[in-house]
Amino acid sequence: MPPSPIRKLVPYADAAKKRGTKVYHLNIGQPDIETPQAILDAVKHTDMKVLEYSPSPGFESYRKKLVEYYKRNSIDVTSNQIIVTTGGSEAIMFAIQSCMDPGDEIIIPEPFYANYNGYAVSAGVKVVPIPSSIENGFALPTIEGFVKAITTRTKAIMICNPNNPTGYLYSREELEVLREICLKHDLFLLSDEAYREFCYDGAKHISALTLEGLEEHAILLDTISKRYSACGGRIGAFVTRNQHVLDTAMKFAQARLSPPTFAQILGEAAVDLPLDYFDEVHAEYTSRRDLLVKRLKAMKGVTCPLPGGAFYAMAKLPVADSEKFCQWLLEGFSHNGATVMMAPAAGFYATPGKGKNEVRLAYVLNKDDINAAMDCLEAALQEYKG
């Protein structure tokens, strides 16, 4: 089981804090946007005498609310095509375990969300990476790259759209390429759409469940964590029109008994938030993105493409080993009593040696803190001898 590049340096951050150093956390996608009070109140005002198990697929009332939410996003599904999961993480695990056997292969454009590796390892599935490049903003690799990677053991392609860790937003044309590959080679398309609401510069998100002809192939993996700044709720969704896959996933859902009760109440209330709720949130993340990228591009030797979605940016630094650099930031550096924590990018790649001089930064802090964090990074790059 590979260690998390997002969390593996936490002991060094804890030690820095004990020394009195302030740590700006750009390593993890934990937003500082407040969770909407209305959905917290829905939990606080719940009147129940016994905290019972929920049904294995989740409360029917919540699944029906999710149908409303998806319909607003041009995704037509029924409540019976949704399994509520314990976070988006469990949805990903259900998908890999339901669609693949040990020894099967899944193709994933890299860099990718690091825990895909862990979920694949736990299922005995081999990740086959298709490299994308920071030079072209991490656009979808060519169709030839995918076709070359397909073997008799290939069962699926997985994407994260918008992408974690790169922030890349896949276009309709790129998704149509994936549609053609999946249909021609009879592959599942697993689509992690946790950041659907966070698309910038007028671009629109296109769900895999809206691609014509993929009714039996597409599986949507979702979560409320980032959407409503409710990461601790641990509520996600596994959505597909493929009944055989649903029946299989339900066995895993029954094995883990049920998803959390209180968080489903929270998620159900979230669907009824005003439709303009995301306007202010969207504007805030856009301004944070613009500030972060502007500061990074102003640093000598740093490359950072403008993310089209999510709230992450990948940057190439003028260092030989970003993991050693990130550890040094926490162990041996401070600027005005502070330092910055980032995620070394090598852990987001399956190909050995890739991403050695890259980092992922999550612009989940307010702009004052982002500025202070960038002051730290700029000073550190000038001081670092590694």
Image (cartoon, rainbow, N blue to C red):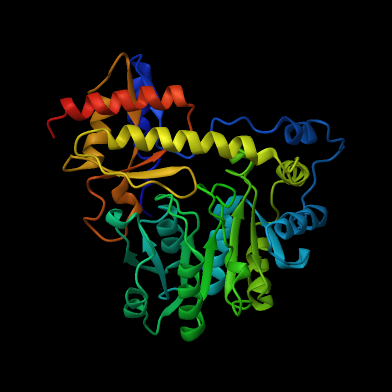
* Residue found at the very far left of the displayed protein: 385
Which quadrant is the C terminus positioned in? top left
Q: Is residue 158 visible?
A: yes
Closer to us: 96 or 202: 202
Tell me if residue 316 comes above or below residue 101 in the rendering: above
The residue drawn where x is 61% and y is 77% is: 212
Where residue 6 sits, quadrant-wise, is top left
- Side (left or right) of 43 relative to 206: right
The residue drawn where x is 65% and y is 33% is: 35
Where residue 77 sits, quadrant-wise, is bottom right
Tell me if residue 14 comes above or below residue 267 in the rendering: above
Residue 289 percent location from the top left of the image? 44, 38
- Side (left or right) of 119 relative to 236: left
Q: How many numbered marks, from 0 up? A: 0
The residue drawn where x is 30% and y is 53% is: 134
- Side (left or right) of 208 relative to 63: left
Residue 64 percent location from the top left of the image? 80, 57
Which quadrant is the N terminus positioned in? bottom left
Residue 257 percent location from the top left of the image? 69, 56
Tell me if residue 314 comes above or below residue 206 in the rendering: above
Q: Is residue 100 visible?
A: no
Residue 277 percent location from the top left of the image? 69, 38
